Amino acid sequence: MTLLPRSWAAAVAPALRVAPAGLHGRRWLWLLLGGRVGAALVAAGLLALRPATDGDTLLAALALLWGAASVVALRLWPRLMGRPGAWVVDLAVVLGLVVASGEWRSPFYLMAVSALIAPATTLTTGLALATGVGFTAVYFALAMTLGIEWETLTSTARLESFSTHLLMPILVVVALAQATRLLNRLDAERERAEALALEGERRRIAWELHDSAKQRIHAAQLVLSSLAPALEAVDAKRLRLALDELDGSVADIEASLTELRTTLGGVRLEEAIRRRAAELQAASGVSIRVRGRAPSLPTFVAVHAYRVASEAISNALRHADPGSIDVSLELQGQDLVLTVSDDGRGMPTDEVQSTGLESMRTRAQTLGGRLRIHSVPRIGTRVVLEVPLRHRELD
């Protein structure tokens, strides 16, 4: 539940990124955790160095308590980094401690600055800058309320200290926002390079299948057909079987070429699988159900997952004679789990380990995941792809 009005949340939603979940998000999370721990310890240490009073002891305890509570909360629920409601609560508590300390040179100043790490690395640069300016304005208002000793600011050292307190938040949010922007741009370029490499490999394989394997099979068909009159007298049954096998091989290659030439084109993974399932259902008459939803994925991940799903469905239709096929997509923890199940005849144990399924295993390894196949004769087969997303930036 957000602490902000729905209208405000809706207005800024387009400028918000998804809560950090990938490699860079984890780095910002660790920066926030380290900054909060260090700031809480500094605050407690500064209060301990003062002349001991009951108020200072209580404030030191509150600093350590809130520092520990915020660190535990972020470790348990990392997506709080992307929740404006959590930012508001954190800033309110820390600025409340600033007020309780009774002076603008507050021992809680560093804790307040650490609270800006989350919005600075989650908002766009413009909104992050606005957040920093807003924080500076609030801090200046608190300084006025707490009572600035204006005569002491005539000292260069005091004036520099006060200016630093006011400008530091703006510098922090701008630097972090720019760093996040540059890292996101690098991620986009890397994803584009991966997509282009994948597209190039797909085209190369499609060309080789079309220009080499398919042409050779056609040539074999022509040779056998020309020899048919002579061979039929010897063994017509085997000749017909050989020609049928060649026809089946051509059909398989055509299906593979269609798969290789198909791109997701910006379509979400579950929608692409549904479209392919509808095509195969119309061609085979077998009921194919697709349920669940995947998070927004990098193209490289989505394409490989789509290929595994398509190949698993096609294999079931070709070899298992199923009555129905179920495809499910779900997020388990930080892993994408894709499952293709059928109620067909199952696979022999030696076929589960055959090279026919090697491409799916290779795709799983390319994604840093794993492929599991469980098959029971006359009951069915289940193919499970598990892809870890914890080290990937999601769209």
Image: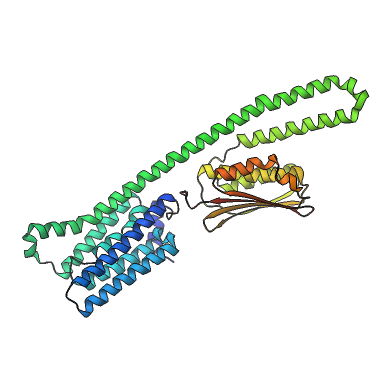
Q: Is residue 56 above or below residue 67?
A: below
Q: Is residue 66 above or below residue 35?
A: below
Q: Nearer the viewer, residue 131 or 100?
A: 100
Q: Residue at x 40, y 66 (%)?
A: 72
Q: Residue at x 84, y 32 (%)?
A: 241
Q: Position of residue 215 (x, y in %)?
A: 70, 24
In this view of the protein, can residue 200 be seen by the observer? yes
Q: Residue at x 22, y 78 (%)?
A: 55
Q: Position of residue 277 (x, y in %)?
A: 67, 46
72 left or right, relative to 141? right
372 left or right, relative to 95? right
In this view of the protein, can residue 16 be seen by the observer? no
Q: Residue at x 48, y 53 (%)?
A: 390
Image quadrant assignment for residue 328: bottom right
312 left or right, relative to 190? right
Q: Position of residue 82 (x, y in %)?
A: 40, 58
Q: Position of residue 98 (x, y in %)?
A: 23, 69
Image quadrant assignment for residue 303: top right
- In this view, the residue farthest toward the bottom is 54
Q: Nearer the viewer, residue 262 or 392?
A: 392
